[in-house]
Image (spheres, grey):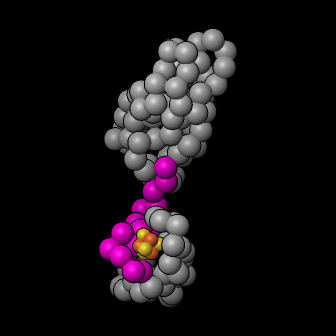
Amino acid sequence: MIRELTCIVCPKGCPLKVELENGAVMNVTGFTCPRGKQYAIDECTHPMRTITSTARTDNGEVIPVKTDRTVPKESMFDCMTEINKAVVRLPARIGDTVIENILGTGANVVATANMD
Ligand code: SF4
C-alpha cells in the first residue's frame, strides 16, 4: 500500500510517498531532507502533533499557550482537557511553563505571550 502525505515540518511542503506493508514502513520517497523522511515514518507509525491553544489566567483573561514539543496525536484530546483546567498565574512571560510534562508526554505547555 502507498500512502501519500504532504510534509508539514517546514513551509516547503514536499509531497511524500510511503510504502507500507502490514503497517510497517518499507520505503519513503519525495523528501528533500532527513526531517521529511522521519516525519513520514512517524506519521505512519506514531503520529505526533504540537498543540497550540489558550489557557485561563487568574484575572479571567486567556493567554496563548503551546506544547514545547510534539505529543502523540491520540493524546491531544486529553491534553486539551488538562489545558482547560489550568489557571495561569500572572504576570507570565513567553516560555514560562504552564503545565510541566503534560500527561507524562515529556512536553511542557508554555506561554507564547507576555501578560501582566
Ligand atoms: S522534506 Fe524537508 S524540505 Fe521538504 S517539507 Fe519536509 S522538512 Fe521541508
Residue 60 appears in the rendering: yes
Residue 41 appears left or right of 79: left
Give coordinates of residue 89: x percent, y percent.
51, 14
Q: Quadrant of residue 39?
A: bottom left
The residue stretch that appears in magenta: 31-50
Magenta highlight on residue 57: no
Q: Quadrant of residue 115?
A: top right
As drawn, 77 above or below 99: below
Give coordinates of residue 41: x percent, y percent.
39, 72
Give coordinates of residue 97: x percent, y percent.
41, 28
For ligand 1, the image quadrant comes to bottom left
For the residue pair 114 and 5, the one nearer the viewer reads as 114
> What residue sits 51% from the left and 72% below the top?
12
- Secondary structure of the magenta portion, mostly? helix
As drawn, 113 above or below 5: above
Residue 45 appears in the rendering: no
> What residue sits 46% from the left and 64% below the top?
9
Q: Quadrant of the C terminus?
A: top right
> What residue sits 51% from the left and 35% below the top?
112
Magenta highlight on residue 35: yes
Count all numbered tags in the image, as a single digit: 0
Q: Residue furthest right?
A: 60
Give coordinates of residue 25: x percent, y percent.
38, 79
> What residue sits 63% from the left and 11% below the top?
59
